[in-house]
Image (tube, coloured by chain):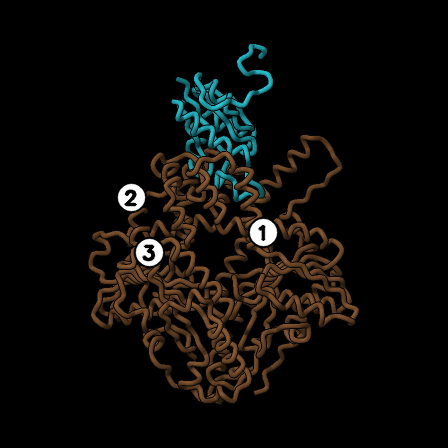
Chain colours: A brown, B cyan
Amino acid sequence: MRFLDHPPRFLFFTGKGGVGKTSIACASAVELAAIGKQILLVSTDPASNVGQVFGVAIGNRITSIDAVPGLSALEIDPQAAAQVYRDRIVGPVRNLLPESVVKGIEEQLSGACTTEIAAFDEFTALLLDSALTAGYDHIVFDTAPTGHTIRLLQLPGAWSGFLEAGKGDASCLGPLAGLEKQRAQYSAAVDALADPERTRLVLVARAQQATLREVARTHEELAAIGLRQQYLVVNGVLADAAAANDSGAAADVLAAAIGRREQAALATIPDVLKTLPMDRIALKPFNLVGLDALRGLLTDTAPIDAPEEIASQPLEAPDLASLVEEIAADGHGLVMLMGKGGVGKTTLAAAIAVELADRGFPVHLTTSDPAAHLAETLTESLEGTGATLEIGRIDPRVETERYREHVLSTKGAQLDDAGRALLEEDLRSPCTEEIAVFQAFSRIIREAGKTFVIMDTAPTGHTLLLLDATGAYHRETTRQLGDTGLQLRTPMMQLQDPKQTKVVLVTLAETTPVLEAAGLQADLERAGIQPWAWVVNQSLAAARTRSPLLRRRAANERELIDAVAEQHARRYAVVALQEAEPIGADQLRRLTTATGAPSW
Amino acid sequence: MKYIQVFDPALCCSTGVCGVDVDQALVSFSADVEWAKQNGARIERYNLAQEPLAFAENVAVRSFLERSGQEALPLILIDGEVALAGRYPTRAELARWAGILAVADPIPVTPCCSGSSCC
């Protein structure tokens, strides 16, 4: 593996949830320890099975792993770190200030920014030369701070306001004000990150166009702030596994189709990634639990059982059509699909829209995925069927840019350079995009009183609670101004009403994506919104395949699908992984129809 | 020299970009505070989301919150006495409170109170 060739002291693995960062970080740590190095492995994965893998309870303290000489590990839970931070701020006033005030403060400190900054705070000590890390040759992190966090820490304006005085003008750096570290420590940590002699960033992707595009964005953002030593790892490549070992794959239609899709994605890899040293890791049939599995990740594939030995009980799970049936029964309403990037929200939104249009309902489908070509083919393929499907498009980049421009040209006009830089950085926060997109969507939401409106995105609970605070203020203002006959409903009120809004959480049958979806659900519940259903998308367990490798992975999915059905979802559906990228009405219809039992 | 304390509402970003709209008053006020400080004023700001203890420990602020709720913030105290609530002061008001006389920048003129004795 090239990314492990002469590594510097700090190794960071980054990529979206489910690509295998933690597994690769663990395997790298084991491999480096095997050549006699002293390694500290730092995991921030909320699904961290690092302890499980090594058979040791780890937690938030450095623990030596007896099974692997030279290896120690540390688990940081960013949520817990954020909670500790919240408690430190809110704890002392809990009985002193009115309860509503305390709740308001807690909400302000419940955003993604707080979690991220709190996690970075935990990192800081590890990036500095100190007694804590002195004995280690390499420190391996299974995550990396985002560009937004690092840029904030680099802004002189941010420091002058907060950390020196401990108070002052607020920004997204706000959470830092209450943290213990000093400016010098944060600066030193940022310097270590930006030093190619000390830090290597490994971008982890899958052989999928969307993931590669996202990784390209991360690459550019982090390179721009100095993290220039970057490597690319494409994980879970089926074609590589098939070539090496999975002889059944060649004859299997699904495996062949996935292989072609991977080739296409790798052939059109974004230009900015082409110059990076790249490694490919073959798809493995096993879950990466246990030391042997980890050792096998970076090396050749282990032999796979013959297909007949793999349990092949057909999956019995509800299909998407059964959910659409219930949605259709109400005759109108807003359906929002929510989930992390790459789980297929746009495709499923289109499938639900087509199914409703087929049933004769007027439907408005709105997508925020600028790369979705499905919308173009959709109107054509429905022509002449009498179905009324209207397609709207909201480009998050355009909306965010418009919002940024508006704010900077109006509200930021009189600021000095430092103030303006800080405002600009605040506007690059992930919250800004979410708010800008949601504002654009809320114009369309009003239609949902009469027709069906299907959206491929939804705001987080945190955003809604913040927006609603403003909504409450607006109501108050209206009341004070006297009855103008204007009835103001906040977005939150509409979303909380299950008669009007159904939130569908989309996930994949993999550990991290399921946990991320559960996190989104908890966040929505905080805002009084109970997600209506879960959809497990791109499931192998619901697909037909003869490939031993894919069947082995399908068997691994069962446990997660059961967890969704029994622990997380009020109602759910499973959608099979498709042979072809679902484009056009006919292929989308296949997603809604019964998954049925695979006929092997 | 009078001591001005500003008790801000809870905001994760005081520029307010996390809200539905950026609050112009907040952006301008931040600039005004900076200006007043450079002219020697003693001003401290407290963000409810970051320093709730400062709110809880001050009797005037705490009873204000109990009475009017956090929606009624900001609250401005001068030497510990309530001077203004529900909105941010203008640059002119800040200057008057802080006794800033020689002003380099033009002060936005409020219709009634600027330098006259009508109120």
Q: Earlier in the sequence, mark 3 or mark 1?
A: 3
Q: Residue at x 68, y 53 (%)?
A: A444
Kind of element beneath mark 2: helix
Picture coordinates of residue A338, whole percent (x, y):
57, 60
**Of residues B106 and A241, the one drawn nearer to the viewer in this rendering:** B106
The reply to whether residue A526 is in sight is no
Whether pointer 3 and pointer 1 mark residues with C-beta atoms closer than 8 Å, the reply is no
What amino acid is labelled 1 in the image? Glu
Picture coordinates of residue A99, whole percent (x, y):
52, 38
Relative vertical location of residue A214 with respect to residue B85 in this rendering, above or below: below
Q: Residues within 10 Å of mark 3 (few under 14, many from 20)?
A: some
Screen quadrant of the C terminus of chain A: bottom right
Kind of element beneath mark 1: helix
Q: CA distance from mark 1 to mark 2?
A: 37 Å
The reply to whether residue A76 is in sight is yes
Q: Within the image, what quadrant is residue B35 found in?
A: top left
Q: Residues within 10 Å of mark 1 (few under 14, many from 20)?
A: many
Where is mark 2, residue-wise?
A184
